[in-house]
Amino acid sequence: MTDPDLCLEACDLSVRYGGRPAVSGVGLQARRGRILAIVGPSGCGKSTVLACFNRLHDLNPACDLRGSIRLDGQEILRSGLDVLALRRRVGLIVQRPNPLPLSIGRNLTFPLRHHGMGRRADRQDAARQAMQRVGLWEEVKDRLGRPASELSGGQQQRLCLARALVLEPEVLLLDEPCSALDPLASAVVEELVASLRGSVTILIVTHNLAQARRLADDVAVFWNRDGVGYLEEQGSADAVFAAPRSPITAAYLAGARG
Amino acid sequence: MASSGAACFDRAIDTALALLAWLVALLVVGTIGWIVADLLRQGLPRLSWAFLVELPIDAGRSGGIRPILISTLLILGVCLAVSVPIGLATALFLAEFQRGHRGFGPLVRYSLDTLAGVPSIVFGLFGNAFFSITLGLGFSILSGGLTLACMVLPLLIRSMETALRAVPAEHRLAAAALGLPQRVSLLHIVLPAAAPGLAVGLILGIGRALAETAALLFTSGYVDRLPGSLLDSGRALSVHIFDLAMNVPGGASQAAATALVLVALVLLINGFTGWAAQRWLGSLSSAAL
Amino acid sequence: MLKPSSSFHRHPDRPLLWTLRLLSAVAALIVALILLFVLREAWPALHQLGPLRFLHDPGWHPAAGGADAQYGLLPMLAGTLLSSGGAVLLAAPLGLGSALFATSYGPPRLGGLHRQLLQVLGGIPSVVVGFWGLVVLTPLIRQWHPPGQSLLAGILCLTVMILPTTALLSEQAVREVPAESLQAAAALGLSRRATLEGVVLPVARGGLLSAVILASGRALGETMAVLMVAGNVIQVPAAVFDPVRTLTANIALELGYALDLHRAVLFVGGLVLMGVVAVVMALAASLQRSPGHG
């Protein structure tokens, strides 16, 4: 039986690029409404694994996924799955803010329209609420028609967060969302992520162990062996940070390696 | 001693090369100046508003070039109406759907590269055999425009593909991550972002089509009357220059005036392309930061 | 509210992809269509006369009819090769000189202006260059050595046509020499000539060569600029002052009234032309793939 608490589960997940293995044998669980921090040194496949959960790798024909990922018990790696619908349920925020080359307002209303929200007033309402949720509304309400590229980096990242939230996702994938931001903007985004706890299942990749400690309910530590990434250890944040089972994890968390 | 001899030799060669370089530069400037000055000297006295809007008289020896301008625009219109949709679709296909090095995409690319190397007179042969005779379009604006469409297609596709590839990949990724279908992301995100570059490609194609003569001689024909329909023969500006210069004794100054109009058009278009490319590509890269 | 996700089409992008594929196939088929139609039109001549007669026939009397007709394409092929060859011989050193002026020997501020002028020259339609050659150049040559309309006039007009190609591409090749190599040469105290000989030319050689080859492809296919000035007499020229007729000019002059076999032979001329240009382009392509350049 599937555990109703379990939102997202990867089993024996492997990724190859052009025949070369990048990640192998990952088994990962993310529980509903909790924040799972994925940590580990560079090049151990954290971001690669994250992009599997909304099948963004489909865009790269050289990329080959093996194994199984279940969202609410439903297999999402099967062919014939409605990938576009999946991506609506599983949002992604990347390291560098990537607003679409549209106005601030259209960045939110445009995806809504193409996901079937027909009435303009509904879209504007939803966009306003999402921007209020990320604390952007007061800053931009007078210039919704201006290009999103005019916003600061931190504002752009919050806009991207709002753009993901406006689609009411069940899962949010965050790929080092703060690493391209200055410390102040980084703190704002981190607070936002913390505030989503309970309403959305969050997977966050981070290099910043302090941030992982502050945010995470659960932690997964990735490592790499001969250039191939794998999952070294996972568990609740308290357990992993206080008493890591693996000596590699212990050394990494102590700052000795990586 | 030997080293100072070598240095002397070096200096002599260096001076000779510098001299050659300056000579070439002056030669280029001189040639352009010569051509332009001569066109101006012969053509400018004939050039007036009346020249643009009057009908040609006495095989073009006097009068104006109105039907020739209209035919040129019609031929250009047919050329663009056919080549732009095909060109844009092919550019989209090559830029957005082809990442591998095998299969259909490389075949299309290879075929277009070959097409780009076909001499323009061979396009004329083909247009005459295919559009004029086999399809029964005769010597007409339609035949000429279609022939030109085939000719400008490689240039159009090459520049449009470049424009599409200049759109940052993160836009496409962002749209995909939001679960937007590719057609939506292409139509609403990629195409608008690439619009300035696409326009540059379009203008390049127009310049190339306007300058062409050989492909039109046996497709759109020589008739200098005002065309009544696309199935009428129509004489392009370039063909008019050729005919006046070669077949009409005493037509040289009218040919020069027509050449001035054509050169002004082409240079205007080329200059605008250069300016636009610089301006928009500049703003594009700063927007990506 | 957002619609439930099940309302989505399974493959919403399929129709778009197939439309694009179809139109790309049309674009790709044009070159095949051209080859097919030129071959088809040339076929009666190839079939009835055989390829050797185009080489062996002493003259060109395609309209004579019956046994009197002669179909020798050799003088035209000679005209094409000689005029293009001459133009390339002139335009290659001029192009290199121009590239050196724009990159090292000229004042930096004039380099950009020089390039813009070359682009202007490249933008002048060939019919205009031909016209200029007809009314300005050939009378001058006539004063020097009649009749004026000659291989020399053709070569000069072709040179004007292809100089922008050789010059701009050569400049690009010279600019591709890495700045570190130039710095290293400067650090060794090499003179400008030695830098040129030891660093610039070896690195840029491939690019320079492909500039010349691409330009010769253009020269071979050029019609108007030679048609209007070269005199169009069918003969293998003995001197640069003799008039010549190129393959392209031959087609442009006769297609208007050619019938039957005569017309077919003109298409054979087109095939020969395509063949010569294809060989030159293949040469350029193999050069670009070969190591040492790119």
Image (cartoon, coloured by chain):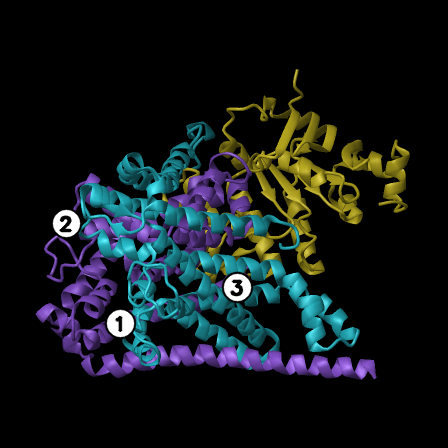
Query: Which label sits in the foreground, 2 or 3?
Result: 3
* Colour of chain B as rendered: purple
In the rendered image, residue B106, in percent from the top left (x then y), is placed at 49, 40
Quarter of the rendering occupied by the C terminus of chain C: bottom right
- Secondary-structure class at tag 3: helix
* Colour of chain C as rendered: cyan
Residue carrying label 1: B259
Q: Is residue C246 above or below residue C289?
A: below
Using the image, name the chain to which the residue with label 3 belongs: C
Q: Quadrant of residue A34?
A: top right
Query: Which label sits in the foreground, 2 or 1?
Result: 1
Residue carrying label 3: C169
* Colour of chain A as rendered: yellow
- The residue sitting at 32% across, 66% down in the picture is C243
Mark 2 or mark 1: name the one nearer the start of the chain: 2
Query: Do tags 2 and 3 sit on the same chain?
Result: no
Checking the image for residue C193, the label placed there is none
Which residue type carries mark 2? Leu
Q: Badge 3: few (under 14), some or many (20 or more) residues near its Cα, within 10 Å?
A: many
Q: Badge 1: few (under 14), some or many (20 or more) residues near its Cα, within 10 Å?
A: many
Residue carrying label 2: B231
In the rendered image, residue A33, in percent from the top left (x then y), is placed at 65, 34
Q: Is residue B81 visible?
A: no
